[in-house]
Each structure stands twice: as structure tokens, then as C-alpha cells.
Image (cartoon, grey):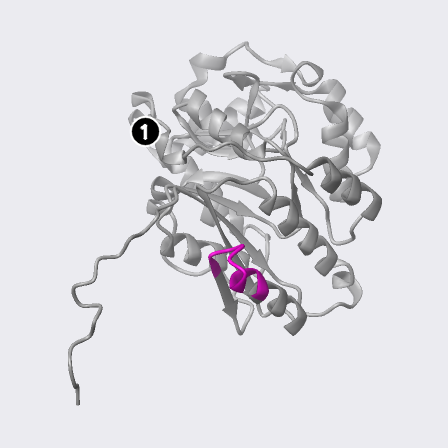
Amino acid sequence: MRIGQNPNIKKELDLSKSSHRVIIPIYIPNSEGYFEGSFDVLKTCVQSLLQTINSDTKITLISNASSDEVNEFIGELYRSGKIDRAVFNAENVGKMNAIIAEARASFETYVTYSDADVFFDKGWLKQTYTMFDSVRSAGFVSMNPTPKNMSLASSTIVANFWKFLGKAQRTSEVCDYSDLEHFHKSIGKDEEHTRDMFDNTRVTCVGDNYIIGAGHFCCTVVRSPVLDKTPRGMSNIAAAGGSENVFLDVPLDKTGLWRLSSPRAYVWHMGNILDKKWADEKLRSLEGFKQDAFRFDDLPGRKVRFTTSLIPYNLRPKIAAGMKKFKLFD
């Protein structure tokens, strides 16, 4: 039985629409073993993010069956208005399933996917905006320099080969050694790996030394084109293990848009153990920082080169593999 009329039937909503959203999936089920230091890392991640965004950016935190302590932390951030969406999954649905579901439920034009162990440095947001603004064919931007990762952008390589043929530069001319070293240490690589990459790699760039190729522990994508190419099914992989390739890399590749990383690090991978001295120094460096106002919706529309559509997608990875085999790029 219904009595009276719902007061919201004719009510108009006053929605202050943002055009950029950060989505962070979180899986910290306990504070033991591998996860012993993860909660401290998460708190540092969130603090750095809140200090480096402007009003155009909204935040979603997704708990994938995390502990009560972590869920309470997320809930308090929501109740205090520091984030506008908090999602609590009773079961761990997996990293990419959580991200894609929230991206589909969002309205923002640009979406940043981030792991929960990322430190956001001052200027990361403006640099992201600037790279999209400077390169109209950019569809995927990372704030961590990633040379030697061009093979994950094969549509760009094949359809735009003429544009960057012979334009490779030495790594030392493009990005900083310490930026690469920090990232490699955070994922368990030794210094020899960094020296190898820095000394021997020639990287191809567009724009202001924007490196072609990028990783995805923290990246910003143009939401609609990528989601249009994303599989509708679910990934059965909890984290990594190829799920990013299926649900993020290949969909972006099919759009024909560029995949780029910045020439210097604006975000830092912390891993599962917090280096407190380093983190405290980085947080102190953010004191007093205020990101200026701009909107991602003010960016020009994305532009895909006509030549991209001339080559069927199933052929592009094969052509790119052949180009790599003959050392046309690293």
C-alpha cells in the first residue's frame, strides 16, 4: 500500500559533476605475514592522494574482503567526506573485477586506476592533465617512467611507425636513474637491472619526452573508449597474472590510442613494507601544497590516426612482434 506521493518524483538533482575519478582496490585481510605492513602503506597512500588532488577529482576506495580495521578506516574517510564512494565486497572479487565494475558505475570522463601501495607526489595530477592535453591521441598515461615497455602498445607502434622511426633516445636523455632505481627496488629487482636498462636502452618518445609504453600499477585512462573494448565477463584471477592484459592493455590497444609514461616519476611504488623515513620525508614535502584548479573535461577530444583502422587488430600484435624481433624497437 502507498500513502501520499514520493517527494523526490519531481525534484531536480543539483549534481556537481567531476570529470576525473581515482579508483583504488584494497585487499588487506589481516596484519600478518605478507600483510603485516600493508595498512601503514595504505594510510600513506591515501594521505598523499588527498594532499595532491583538486576539486575535479573524486575518489573510490574498494575493500575486497579486507579486515574490520581497514574497513573502519575506509568508512571514516567516507563519513568525513574525504572520499565520495566506499565499496565493501564481502568476498575478494579480484583486482580487475573490482576496478572495472566501479569504472562502469562511474560517470567521470577520465579514470585513474591505482594500487593501494602508491605514493602520489605533488604535480602528478597536473602532469597527467598536461600529457593528455599535449598529445591528443593519448589514451593511457602513467606517471612512472617505463622505458622498454613499448610492446604493450602495438597498435600505436604499427599505425604510427613512420612518426617515430629513428627518433629513439638514450634512457639517460629521457628519464632519471634514481626514478628507475626506486621502482625496481620496490618490485624486488637489484641495481644491476636498473643499470642494464638505463645504460643500454634507447627509448622512443612523443611530445615533451613522453615515453611510448607504460605500466599499470597507477595509470589514467580515457574511460569510455577503453570500457567499450573491455570484456563483459569476469576475470578469475585475484591479482595480476595476466588479468591487466585482458581487461586493460588489450582494450586500450584496440582503441588505437597512445600509451605513454612521463619522463620522471610523479608516483612511487611503496610495496608491502613502508619505509617510514622515506615516507615521512615525502609527506613533509607535500605540506602546504595545493593543486591548482582545472577540469579534465576541458581537455580536447581524443584523436585516433586514420591509419589505425586500415590494419585489422588481430594483425597488429603480429606485426609488432615481428618489428621487435628485428630490433626495430626494444
Identity of the residue furthest to the bottom in this view: 1
Q: Can residue 237 be seen in this view?
A: no
Q: Residue 305 location in percent, x, y?
A: 33, 22
Residue at point 44%, 32% (across, down): 294
Bounds of the magenta segment: 76-85
Q: Residue 243 location in percent, x, y?
A: 52, 52
Q: In this view, does 176 lie to the left or right of 166?
A: right
The relative height of residue 269 versus residue 13 in the rendered view (above or below) is above
Residue at point 54%, 16% (across, down): 208
Identity of the residue furthest to the top in this view: 166
Q: Nearer the viewer, residue 132 or 203?
A: 132
Q: Which of 16 and 207 is in front in this view?
A: 16
Q: What residue type is labelled 1?
A: Gly
In reply to whether residue 295 is colored magenta, the answer given is: no
Q: Which of 303 and 312 is in front in this view?
A: 303
Quarter placement of the N terminus:
bottom left
Task: For label 1, count other residues whose C-alpha is less than 10 Å away and answer few (under 14), some (14-19) or many (20+).
Answer: few
Q: Is mark 1 on a helix, strand or loop?
A: loop
Q: Is residue 40 left or right of residue 240?
A: right
The relative height of residue 47 versus residue 149 in the rendered view (above or below) is below
Q: Can residue 211 be seen in this view?
A: yes
Q: In this view, does 12 lie to the left or right of 275?
A: left
Please name the residue that numbered disc 1 is placed on.
301
Residue at point 78%, 51% (across, down): 274
Q: Residue 201 location in percent, x, y?
A: 68, 20
The relative height of residue 119 versus residue 173 in the rendered view (above or below) is below
Q: Residue 164 location in percent, x, y?
A: 49, 14
- Quarter-of-image position of residue 74: bottom right
